[in-house]
Image (cartoon, rainbow, N blue to C red):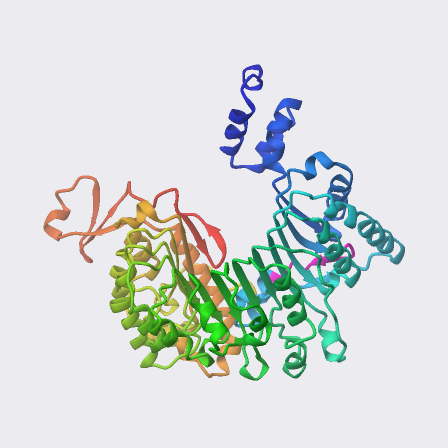
Amino acid sequence: MSSMTSLPVELVQEIGGLICKLEEKKNLRATCVKLALALSPQLFKEVVLDVNRDTLGCGLHLLETLASCSLLCEYVRTLSIESLAPSFYLDPAFPDRKVYTSYLLDHARQRRIEDGMKCTRREEAQCMMEKLLLPAVSSLSQLRVFRWTWHWTDSVSTLKTVMAALGALIQLEEFHFCYIPDPETYDRDEECTLPLPGVTNLKVISLTIPEDPEVSWKRKSAKLTDPALVPFVKHLLSGSPSVSKLYLDNGSSCIGLWARLNDILEEFLPLPELRELTFGGWKISLTDKMCAQLRLLTSLELLHCTKFNPDVWPFLQEEQIHLQRLGTDNVSDTLLDYLSSYSNKLVHLSLTGPTWYSSQNYNDLADRFFNEVLPLHKETLESLEVLPTFEGRWCFEENNSAAIQSCLKLKNLSVKVNCINMPDMEDAKSDNGIVWPGAYHTVHKTTTHNPVHLLLNTIATSSLSDSLETLSIDGARSTGMVRSMADSYFGPGYRIGARKRIRKSVETFEFVEAVNRTNCVSEDSYSCTQDVGTVKKKDVKLSDQIRVVVAGVLCSWV
């Protein structure tokens, strides 16, 4: 240890940066004062504040540390607030139940449960937290990034306290805020005004009011258009004329609930530094100011609303605006026309759709995308997400594997597979006993190949094995139960069963190379499977650098 303490601080920090496990880095920091001083900037660069029933002691201790220790506060660059609700805890059964609550699994949120804590103890914990909150947040003088998903159980008082404290953070550059109000407040027709933070000169603004199935759609139309989000956005934009990235999502996917994006942005447009724009649930009008802003963009994502904003893609094509990043949840011919109008400039493409299904058009669009559009961007594309709602040729299969394989610089790949073709495996039942609806799918299977093994094999036999860093796999919804009441009963069990089969397929993957039967017996390092004309190579597997994620959970292979 004496030799390490004699090293310059810069070398100690470089060594610390190579330590992946947080616990090991903490242990090294605890060995002596010099190492503690050298490694503290790394350990406290990002702080997560989580105060709930299960983390009450740790959460309050962290608040006390931040409120009293100015030295550690200087190291903090990112603050993420997970919860400020001492008498609530996250529903432990939520991961198993969320698939039944909504088809939009990615938008489902953790339910919070009140723990029945005695009233006096609850008030003491709440009082202590609120007392520490203002000095703790205000002391983060070097903070650059602030993230908070405010849930109604965090209380309005904590919301006001934190927003007031942010005014002291003059170095703040990124503001990410998600607002989840009390459903009962909506239904009682009560207004909930968001306190305005005193932050200025932001570079990144991200605001979200996620769609909540518990809130009646009639109340949404009144709430989402002006009382909460609109004044909040205008306030932030008025003090941040140099914002470069703007994310606005009002959570609505119904056309009758939309507000016009122009109503918020028109008085500030064009923003000269704005290059990345994401909006969800907003309808835009191509006014002169909006058109001038679109000409400046390098990144555009349209969520929940593309279908009813049909003029955007033709305008971009006509103006020859070649986006480097593009995302949408609705795929159309006009979108593919735009993507076909230029080549080798697109770096990130995210298609979280189509969200609709038509037996002919659905697959025709997929064929056009993989055969005509994707090859135009194969030399520059680094991130590709193709996440359709329903099964079909949008999912990964042998017909589109060559197009994906040709993307030479791909680092992140997210796809869905046709669960209809997944083989039967053990653990076919979901945890709650709903079985895989195999009778229907056995009749309608299109191939005997395991699509997950085909995907992994495609990566292992191409240049993707060298460039790819993250591979995300999930299952699509069955087309056999579209517009059918059976989907409400079988659908969740179908998706849970599909994910188990995908995970099992990843864990049991072995590299397979097709060869001629005549060559099969001459290779000593191969074991031949004569009936299918393939061989398994025992010593080949995916690169260790590739992270395989199944439905958001990191997976491993044997």
Q: The N terminus lies in which quarter of the figure?
A: top right
Q: Is residue 228 magenta?
A: no
The total number of labels drawn is: 0
Q: Residue at x 32, y 61 (%)?
A: 450
Outermost residue, right side: 120
Q: Residue placed at 35% from the left, 43% from the top?
A: 543
> Which of the 4 image quadrants contains residue 521?
top left
Query: In the rendering, at what x and y percent does residue 392 appear?
Result: 34, 72
Image location (x, y in percent) of residue 457: 29, 53
Instruction: Please indicate whether residue 431 sits to the left or right of residue 525 in the image.
Output: right
Q: Position of residue 301 (x, y in %)?
A: 46, 66
Q: Quadrant of residue 186?
A: bottom right
Task: Point out the stretch of residues depicted in magenta.
Answer: 86-94
**Is residue 110 visible to the viewer in this orientation of the structure?**
no
Q: Is residue 443 above or below residue 530?
A: below
Q: Is residue 348 visible?
A: yes
Q: Picture quarter containing residue 202?
A: bottom right
Does residue 367 appear to the left or right of 143 in the view shown? left
- Relative image position of residue 97 (x, y in whole percent): 59, 66
Q: Nearer the viewer, residue 34 or 467?
A: 34
Horizontal side, residue 484 vs residue 200: left or right: left
Front-lying residue, 102 or 287: 287
| Quarter of the figure that contains the C terminus | top left
Q: In the picture provided, is 345 more to the left or to the right than 134?
A: left
Residue at the outermost left position? 518
* Nearest the eye: 73 or 239: 239
In the figure, 503 relative to 36: above or below? Answer: below
